[in-house]
Each structure stands twice: as structure tokens, then as C-alpha cells.
Amino acid sequence: MVYSGGSDGWTCRCLCCCCAGVPVNVHWTFFFVWILQIVISLIQYKFDYWKYIVNIAVLWGPVLFFICVLHEWGHVILNRLFGGTCHYMTIWPLGGFSDTKIENGTCLQEFWVALCGPLMHIPQFFIFMIAMAIAAPNGLNYYGSPAGVAALQEGGVGLFFAQLAKGAIDINMMLFFMNLLVPAFPLDAARMLASMGVHCGLSVPRAAWMLVVIGGLLGAAALIFGIIGLITGHNLGFFMLFLGLFMAWTTWSMYRSIQNKQIFQHPVFAPDCYHPERGRPTNLSSPVPPTQSAMSRPSRNNNEQSRDIESGRPNKNKKSNRSSKAGSEPGPTSSTTTPKNKKKPGASTKKKSVPKKKKSADTNPSSL
């Protein structure tokens, strides 16, 4: 998945290495799944089949790390082709997330960047297929079956690498279909669905609610399949249970972001193409973007009224029509009343000045 800022539990990571100027971090869930798979293999076969346990440790450790790094580099490469930047990438068992940013990016660019991650599993599938054919030209027993485990214990180095390649093929197929067809955060399909929904006219809150509903249903389904896998003893039982719990946690996090009106700070909607300054609605309480605010309409009507009065055109407002009918006509009255008002203050000043002169003349002793 592509992660574009925000803090939603993704900060629990440790720096592993630096690849082409991009720091590569490892999320705590990667170590959790790695240790979990080793513990499950120890419970099933103990140390009687130590080669299988070593194979599991290598597969769910370095091999899975290599697969996830290539997955994330699919996001980073296309992001750089669009003129974006990547500050770091974090690896987790189902791929990872990259802190990417495209200045003034569009929803279509966001869609293609999210799609490039799952597409990186296609060349890996063929590479591991060729490696398995070279290491085991006579065929290979099913990976993880009792017959395959026994053959691995009795076989040599070639069979060990063939089993390792077969497990890598299964992981690539799982990551490809899950990130491409399961639209639940934090998988890439959630970002693709959100970007296409907003591009087709959905508002950001509606797109977020769509992801919450789909993520909740798929998380519940993963929990059910995980419990069934634990009961039946399937190898992916613990993994599906962990995936269901993780999806439930991330879906709840998105739901809280919607309730707190902080959806633009969520990792899915953190890119610039979803921000209010990029043309998205700022009112999160109403999913429909307002066409015209209520505060701008009266000011516009007042301006139109003043323009109509100055030009002499009839006003469309009912209140102004009633006020004009109750009074006299505005044209002649205004022209006749203004000069009278101007003469009255002038006349009053003259009357006040005359008695002052007379009074001063009567009281002057020199005149007597």
C-alpha cells in the first residue's frame, strides 16, 4: 500500500536498511508473523524435520522481505515518474506502505501508483517458477504436505531451494490477489477504490464510508476463515486470523476518523488530490459539496438591489417592491426634496446672523 503521511499506528517500526536513498523500515507485524510461522512449524513437526523449519524461517523472513521490498518499489518508481518524492518505506507481511507525495497530484495518478505494487508480483512469479524448475527438474511434492516435508528432510540442497521457490510462488500469488481484489484498508485495492470513487464524483466522506463497510465485511470474513482454519489445522489459519484482526483495527480507525471529522488526516486520504485546497469539500458533515454558501447569497442580492435602484430598473425582491409602493416614486421625490433640504440650512444661518448684527449695533456705546 502507499502511505502518504499521518499517524495511524504505522510508527511502530524499526530502521532496517536504505535502498536507493529511501530508508526501509520493518513494521512490528512482520516480526510477529515470522515468529508465528516458526512456532507453528515447531508445534507440528518439532525438530524431527529441521530442514522444513529452516525452510519456513528463511521463507517468512528474508524471502518475504525481498518480495515486499519489490512490491513497494513498484509504488516508488511510478511515483517518481509522476514527479513525486518518497521519504521512506515500511515493510509488513502483506506488502508495505511508502511515504510518497505528488505535488498537485490527481486521483488517476493515485490509482496508477497504487496499482503498480501488485503488478510487481507478476515478474516475481515467473522468476521463482524458473528457479523451482531448475532446482527440481523431476517435479516437486506439494509444499507443506507430509510427503513434501519428508522428501525435503531426505533430499539435498536442490530440493531445499525448490521448496523455498514453491513457497515464494504461493506468497506472490496471495499478495497479488489480496492487494488487487480485496478493497479493504490497508491493502492497495482500498486506495484504488477510493481514488476511482472520488474521480468519478464521490465525495471523500462517502468514499470513506464505502471503505468502512467493505472493510468491516471482509474483516469479519477473514476472522471466520481464520477460526475455521485453526479448527481444521490449516497452515493459513493463524495468518487469516491475524489478517482479520488487523483489518478490523484499521477499519475501526477509519470509522473514528470519520466521526471526528479528521478523514483528510487518514493515510488513505492524505494525498494532495483529496485535500480541500485541491477542490474537495471542506464540510465533512455533509457528503455533498455545497455549490453556494448561505452567507454569500444575501450579499449578492443586496448588491443587485443597489444596482437596480441606481439604474432605475424594477427590483425583483418582494420586500423592495412593497416599500416602493408604500412610498412615493423614487425619481421625482428624490430630485425635489434634495434642493429644499439644501436651502433650509442656508436660510437658518442668515436669520441667525441678522439679529446678532442688530444686537451688536444697539449695544455699542460709540454709536450712541
Image (cartoon, rainbow, N blue to C red):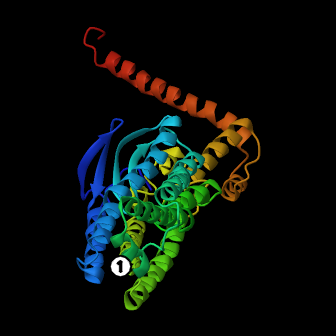
Please name the residue shown 34% across and 16% down the image. 361
For this view, does 111 lie left or right of residue 233? Answer: right
Q: Nearer the viewer, residue 217 or 314?
A: 217
Please state if 306 lies on the left or on the right of 37 as rendered: right
Q: Which residue lies most toward the right here?
A: 313
Q: Residue at x 54, y 70 (%)?
A: 210
Q: Position of residue 200 (x, y in %)?
A: 65, 57
Residue 169 visible in the displayed image: yes
Residue 119 is left or right of residue 166, and the answer is: right
Q: Quadrant of the N terminus?
A: bottom left
Location of residue 37 in the rendering, given as x and y in whole percent from the top left corner: 31, 72
At numbered mark 1, what does the secondary structure look like: helix, strand or loop?
Answer: helix
- Residue holding disc 1: 238
Tag count in the figure? 1
* Depth check, front residue: 4 or 44: 44
- State the residue in front, 321 or 280: 280
Residue shown at the point (28%, 66%) measured from the top left = 54
Name the quadrant of the C terminus.
top left
The crowding category of the residue bearing disc 1, from other C-alpha atoms within 10 Å (few below 14, some 14 to 19, many at least 20), is many
Q: Position of residue 367 (x, y in %)?
A: 31, 9
Residue nearer the viewer, 164 or 216: 164
111 to 252, vertically: above or below: above
Amino acid of disc 1 = Phe
Outermost residue toward the bottom in this view? 231
Residue at image position (76%, 42%) is: 313
Question: In the rendered image of this protein, does residue 118 appear above or below residue 174?
Answer: above
Q: Residue 281: x, y in percent?
A: 53, 55
Q: Is residue 102 visible?
A: no
